[in-house]
Each structure stands twice: as C-alpha cells, then as structure tokens.
Image (tube, rainbow, N blue to C red):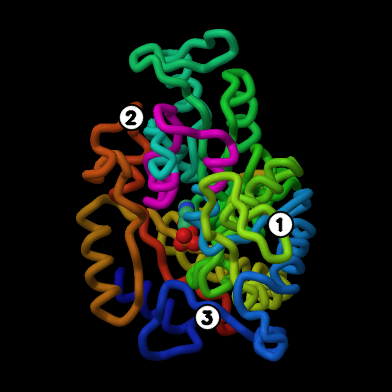
Amino acid sequence: MFDEILTFIRTINEKDDFIPLHEPVFHGNEKKYLNECIDSGFVSSVGAFVNEFEKAIANYTGAKRAVVVVNGTQALHLACVVAGIQRGDEVITQALSFIATANAISYTGATCVFVDVDKETLGMSPSSLENFLLQHTQLKNGICTNKHTGKQIKACIPMHTFGHPTKIDDIKVICDRHNIILIEDAAESLGSWYKGKHTGRFGTIGVFSFNGNKIITTGGGGALITDDESLADKAKHLSTTAKIPHPWQYEHDAVGYNYRMPNLNAALGLAQLESIQELLNQKRSLFQLYKTFFNRKKIQLIEEPLNCSSNYWLQAIILNNKIERDNFLNYSNENGVMTRPIWSLLNKSTMYKNSFYTTLENSEWLEDRVVNIPSSSKMYKTI
Ligand SMILES: *Cc1c(COP(=O)(O)O)cnc(C)c1O
C-alpha cells in the first residue's frame, strides 16, 4: 500500500529524486523587482516596495490596512501587543497548532488555555471553546474572568490549519458574547476564503506568514491585517522602534520593536502575490489528483470545508492509527519522499505542560494520524 502511494506521488511529480513537502516558485516579476530594489539602494527598512506590498495585501484580502513585518511569529506577537494582551492575561488557542501561536502569546507574559479542534476543519472547535467559557468563566463588569485563576480571558486565537478555514463565524459570535478579542492566526491561509470573506478578516486582527514554506514567500516575513486604522498605525509605530517621525531626531515614545519588513523582502513578496491565483489553481488541481487516487485507496484526504475556498497549502491524509502513521513516515522519508506528521499537541510540550487545557479528544485522535504529503504547486504533471 505504502509503495503504491509513493509510486503515485512520483508519477505526478516533475522531479525524480528527492521530493520535498513544499517548494516556492518564482516565475513572475521576482527578479525584476529585486533588481529594481537593489538599484534603488533602498534594500533595508525603508522603501517603496514595503508600502506597495502592504497595499497589495490589504487589497487582496479586502482589509483596510496591512502592516508587514519580519516574520509571522512577530506579526502574531505584535497583534497580541496592539490588542492589549498583557502579563497576567489568559488567551485561548487550540492545542493542535504550530508552536508559534503559543509562543507569541507567551512573549506578552500572558498564559495559554488550550481547547480542542474539529475533525473536519482541523481548526478550533466552536463547541469546545463555548464549553470552556461556560464552565470556567464568568462575565464580571463586562470582563470575561476565569473562575479558578481570577485572571481575565483577554483574547482567543484560532488557526486555519493547512489553509483550511476553521468555523470562524461561529467562533466570532462566541467571542463577542463573552467579550473576548478575536485574533486569527491565518499564517497558513493566505488565499483561503470563508463564505466569501478572506480568512484573517473575521477578528480584530489577522496574521499571515511569508516564510519559505508558506503559500507565497518573502524569504522571511509576516503581516497583520485589520480594519481598525488606529490599531494598524499602532502596529506600524511599534514595529518601527516606536520612533516619532522626524527627519533626524531619535525620539521614541514606547518600548518598541525592530520588526519592520526590509524593502528587499517586500519586493519579492509583491511579485509573489501577483502570481497567487495561478498558485492556488495548481494547488487545487493537485488536490483533485490526490483525491481521485486516495478515494480509490479508501484513505481520507483532508478537503476544504463546506462554503469555503481553501488555498490547499499542505495536503494531508489521515491514516488508521499511530503505528501505521509511523511506518508510513519512516518508509516515505527513507525513500526520498518527504512527509511530516501534524504537530505534537502544544499542551504536551515542556513549556506549556502546566497550561490549562480542556478535553482534547479530536486533537489527540488527529495527532496520531495526520500526515502531510508533498504539496508543491509546481509538482504535478498533467497525466
Ligand atoms: C508558519 C506559521 C507561523 C509563523 O510564521 P513564521 O513566519 O515562520 O514566523 C505561525 N503560526 C502558524 C500556524 C504557522 O504555520
């Protein structure tokens, strides 16, 4: 069975040696813009490409504003800071996510609360979120307070796993009802829409990553999007060492960060974003090829949820159990086809093992079974 899967992956792949999980593609204006950027002399923290890329991200997603920074993790951190998350607060996120989600919360001094995910979306389960809030919190003068710790539940950060939109409108309703700020970790979901609205636009702030392995890349980079002009201004200001604009003086009015995206990276990003529709079409075609194959093999392939359009960033299959999964991971990686298990649950890591978590039935089930398979947009041959 495993060898049939590898044979199929090799059949649809342009390469015949090592097949990676995801490769970036550069066949648009990347070199042209990078040359322009170098010729301009503005390769670092100031330059026209930064503003253009910010406008292009805002325009593409439909958000009023975008602020681009050095990576997705710092974008998440900055989102937490401008949303007012502080030491002593609690922030709800999902146990099944990449480590950066929890790390960004921790950088502010807040603690994480982990809830479960849904099996179909792999994203935060609205019912798990609601159950936690009903059982363990109360609203005191409009402040959602944890009954056991006495701390404020300040925010909720769901994540759109592998680009598949989570049930974000239900989550939004629950957050509003409990007076909690919603921030979306949309690091994996640029190009994914939930009921016609781009992911990252349901909460107060949404965050993207442009790391080399993401749907588009700036080398390293991230962005936050928001419809709130004052939050965007604040994010821009804090990412620029909180320097008060002045032709020569150094005056800073807060403990800021040096998080700005360099112009060089923005030049690459602008070119990448121009080609995103073609990338998305290829990702979808690859999914269709996999779907036909895995349907025949009776192996479940993760599909975009109803009424959603997923970017199909990483393709994922669900194997029968942990033993089968481990065997497949060993076999495929030993034979030059890169595969990866989904993340280990965040509440199991040494840093987060003392955090509160709800029952995590679905997360634990998925943790043992989900495997990512090669997903490059350029990999498939029309067969
Ligand atoms: C990639 C990713 C991030 C972090 O992005 P970087 O640009 O690598 O810092 C955060 N959250 C999730 C879910 C991610 O997949």
- The answer to whether residue 77 is left or right of residue 246 is left
Q: Which numbered circle lies on residue 245? A: 1
Q: Label 3, secondary structure: give it.
A: loop
**81 versus 29 height, above or below:** above
> Which comes before the other along the chain, label 1 or label 3?
1
Q: Label 1, secondary structure: give it.
A: loop
Residue type indicated by callout 2: Tyr
Q: Position of residue 332 (x, y in %)?
A: 29, 73
Foreground tag (1 vs 3): 1
Label 1: how many Cα within 10 Å (few below 14, some 14–19, many 20+): few
Q: Which residues are magenta?
A: 78-104
Which residue is identified by label 3? Answer: 379
Residue type indicated by callout 1: Pro
- The answer to whether residue 89 is left or right of residue 254 is left
**Distance of label 2 from label 1 (alpha carbons):** 44 Å
**What residue lies at 41% left-to-right and 78% top-to-bottom?**
20
**Distance of label 2 from label 3 (alpha carbons):** 39 Å
- The answer to whether residue 369 is left or right of residue 374 is left
